[in-house]
Amino acid sequence: MQERIQQELPLLRQRWPNVEYREEGNWVRIPSYALPNGWNREVTEVAFAIPVGYPGTPPYGISVPSGILFSGARPKDYTEPAPTQPPFGGTWGIFSWAPADGQWRPAADPVSGSNLVNWVLGFAVRFREGT
């Protein structure tokens, strides 16, 4: 799994140069993720844990610093504080989110199938939903 993560971190950094990775717990943080209109932030940090069994087991959940709102309300499928806090300081909440069934199709070559870049690009789907 660590070898695969090390192959994918440069792919993430091509799109998000400031990606931070913590090997303990396999946490990834992107310090500036743009949000669509309606959120109480234009940009937010996002974080996620890479699960044991990756890439066969896809990541799950989008962590954001607490206090996020859409149109003044707490979003659906969002828990604050998150039961497991990312190791990046502050208090975080988590969106219960995963790609739709059948959309996660990893391959032996990270570029040929689903990877962490696809995962993070998929966050846009959730954030466009709003509440």
Image (tube, rainbow, N blue to C red):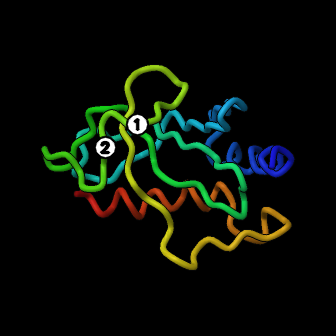
Image-based side of 73 in relation to 68, left or right: left
Task: Return the x and y of residue 13 as percentages of the image width and height.
Answer: 69, 43
The answer to which image quadrant residue 97 occupies is bottom left
The crowd level at tag 2 (other Cα within 10 Å; few <14, some 14-19, many 20+) is some
13 shown above or below 24: below
Residue at the location (82% across, 44% down)?
2
Mark 1 surroundings within 10 Å by alpha-carbon count, few (fewer than 14), some (14 through 19), many (20 or more): few
In the picture, the disc for residue 83 is: 1
Q: In terms of secondary structure, where does tag 1 sit?
A: loop
Q: Which sits in the foreground, 92 or 10?
A: 92
Dot 2 falls on a residue whose secondary structure is: strand
- Label 1 – label 2 distance at C-alpha: 8 Å
Kindly check if marks 1 and 2 are in contact, taking CB atoms under 8 A apart as contact: yes
Residue appearing at x 22%, y 57% in the figure: 131
Label 2 belongs to which residue? 79
| Residue 80 location, quadrant | top left
